[in-house]
Amino acid sequence: MRPVEARIVISAPRADVFDFVSDIANRPAWHDHYLKDFRLTRVNPVGVGAGAAFLIDAPLFPQRAEFQVVESERPRRIVERGRIGRWGRTTGWTEWEFSDEYGATEVRLAFWSEPGIRWDAFKGSLGARGWLRRQARGSLRRLRMIFEERPDKPLLRATVAGYEPLKAARFG
């Protein structure tokens, strides 16, 4: 699939926006309208290696997906690599870029994927690109609301499935 891009300007310092986005546990706070059953894949949700598994709730073909952060250059860029669909045949990437705009931050979000087989490419050609662009734009608007309107109640956060912190191993 060709890249799908979305951009938005947020009235907040770049480092604050980067720190919020790089914490994978915060993602359900603004992605929950199209990503369901969001679970972390490891306890530490920040930095290279952090990841999540979720369901992409697309209208025609809902698909399971998981991703992992492969690059993180604070406060400029985050690159994520994922596996999508049945048996993880489709490989996908997400790139977040943060640029300073005189006290505000421009956030650029780009998705692209390489289908594993022709059937996956056919499913992607049935309007997935337009649907994904609309969802990404909506997500970025919700992210801007988090920074500019400061919600009253606590934000939704993801957890590790089956993780009990009081029974976890303690090192040092």
Image (cartoon, rainbow, N blue to C red):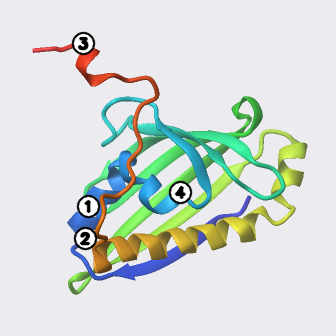
Q: Residues within 10 Å of mark 2 (few under 14, many from 20)?
A: many
Q: Residues within 10 Å of mark 3 (few under 14, many from 20)?
A: few
Q: Which mark is residue 75?
A: 1
Which mark lies nearer to you, 1 or 3?
Answer: 3
Q: Secondary structure at mark 1?
A: loop
Q: Is residue 62 left or right of residue 78?
A: right
Q: Which mark is residue 32?
A: 4
Instruction: Please name the residue shown 66% across and 50% down the image.
Output: 56
Instruction: Please name the residue shown 39% across and 37% down the image.
Output: 50
Give whichever of discs 4 and 1 has the lower sequence position. Answer: 4
User: Which residue ends up furthest to the left in the rendered image?
Assistant: 172
Give whichever of discs 2 and 4 has the lower sequence position. Answer: 2
Mark 3 vs mark 4, CA separation in Å? 31 Å
Q: Which mark is residue 14?
A: 2
Q: Residues within 10 Å of mark 1 (few under 14, many from 20)?
A: some
User: Which residue ends up furthest to the front in the rendered image?
Assistant: 153
Q: Quadrant of the N terminus?
A: bottom right
Query: What residue type is disc 4 on?
Result: Asp
Give whichever of discs 1 and 3 has the lower sequence position. Answer: 1
Q: Quadrant of residue 51?
A: top left
Q: Secondary structure at mark 4?
A: loop
x and y percentages locating residue 39 in the rendered image:
49, 37
- Say which residue label 3 marks: 169
Query: What residue type is disc 3 on?
Result: Ala
Q: Residues within 10 Å of mark 4 (few under 14, many from 20)?
A: some
Give whichever of discs 2 and 1 has the lower sequence position. Answer: 2
In this view, the residue in front, 144 or 164, is 164
Q: Is residue 19 depicted above or below 51 in this figure?
A: below
Give whichever of discs 3 and 4 has the lower sequence position. Answer: 4
Labels 3 & 2 near each other (Cβ < 8 A): no
Labels 4 & 1 near each other (Cβ < 8 A): no
Query: What residue type is disc 2 on?
Result: Arg
